[in-house]
Image (spheres, rainbow, N blue to C red):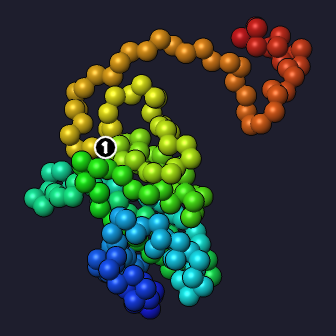
């Protein structure tokens, strides 16, 4: 994998900030946020790298660390197509004043849900994301709970119960209920 790190440093000399290898053998590269999508596209499309599978994106709020500028660290994990045990960590940083990154959903469709999750819990915005809205919390939720400055005893606005239509499992209409099952349900 060291060849992959060398290839990235050679191809993007001004945008690769640093490289590292973990004790488990995973390699990582820290890149400038402005070049993130271009580097991601290269990692996926170049046959020498072949990072076809998107695994996840996570963030770290560095607010309480001694060196906390820029405030947010964002790490993407991708895996090779031909040798799936080979992983790459793409890391970048964004500031509190402008917590934005280009969306990698156009590169890896699997980034869709993970970017929404990161937006939901950290408040990081992904430009050009096709549907950037909360994924686990409700739309009226105030704040982003994984930020270090989120109030631990804060209260959320109370909302009236929303009407729920008939519950269904999977696509299509609900299966018809047999009369004997309906009778059993009533007698319980």
Residue 60 seen anywhere in this rendered image of the structure = yes
In the rendered image, which quarter is residue 23 located in? Answer: bottom left
Across and down, in percent, residue 3 comes to 44, 91
The residue under the point 35% across, 18% down is 157
Q: In what quadrant of the picture does the C terminus appear?
A: top right
Across and down, in percent, residue 42 comes to 52, 77
The residue lying furthest to the left in this view is 66
Q: Is residue 166 left or right of residue 123?
A: right
The residue under the point 29% across, 61% down is 93
Does residue 119 lie above or below 179 as drawn?
below
Does residue 60 lie above or below 121 as drawn?
below
In the rendered image, which quarter is residue 77 located in? Answer: bottom left
Residue 5 seen anywhere in this rendered image of the structure = no
Location of mark 1 (residue) = 146
Q: Secondary structure at mark 1?
A: loop
The residue lying furthest to the top in this view is 187
Does residue 16 lie above or below 76 as drawn?
below
Q: Residue 42 versus residue 48: which sits nearer the camera?
A: 42
Across and down, in percent, residue 81 comes to 61, 77
Q: In what quadrant of the picture does the N terminus appear?
A: bottom left
């Amino acid at each position: 994998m060291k060849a992959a790190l060398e290839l990235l440093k050679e191809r993007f000399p001004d945008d690769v900030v640093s490289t590292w290898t973990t004790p488990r053998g995973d390699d990582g590269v820290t890149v400038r946020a402005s070049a993130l999508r271009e580097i991601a596209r290269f990692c996926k499309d170049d046959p020498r790298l072949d990072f076809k599978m998107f695994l996840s994106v996570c963030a770290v709020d560095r607010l309480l660390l001694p060196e906390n500028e820029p405030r947010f660290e964002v790490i993407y994990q991708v895996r090779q197509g031909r040798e799936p045990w080979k992983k790459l960590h793409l890391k970048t940083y964004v500031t509190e004043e402008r917590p934005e990154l280009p969306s990698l959903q156009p590169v890896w469709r699997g980034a869709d849900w993970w970017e929404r999750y990161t937006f939901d819990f950290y408040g990081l915005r992904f430009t050009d994301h096709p549907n950037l809205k909360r994924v686990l919390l409700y739309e009226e939720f105030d704040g982003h709970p994984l930020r270090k400055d989120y109030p631990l005893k804060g209260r959320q606005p109370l909302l009236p119960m929303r009407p729920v239509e008939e519950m269904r499992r999977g696509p299509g209409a609900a299966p018809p209920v047999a009369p004997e099952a309906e009778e059993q349900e009533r007698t319980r």
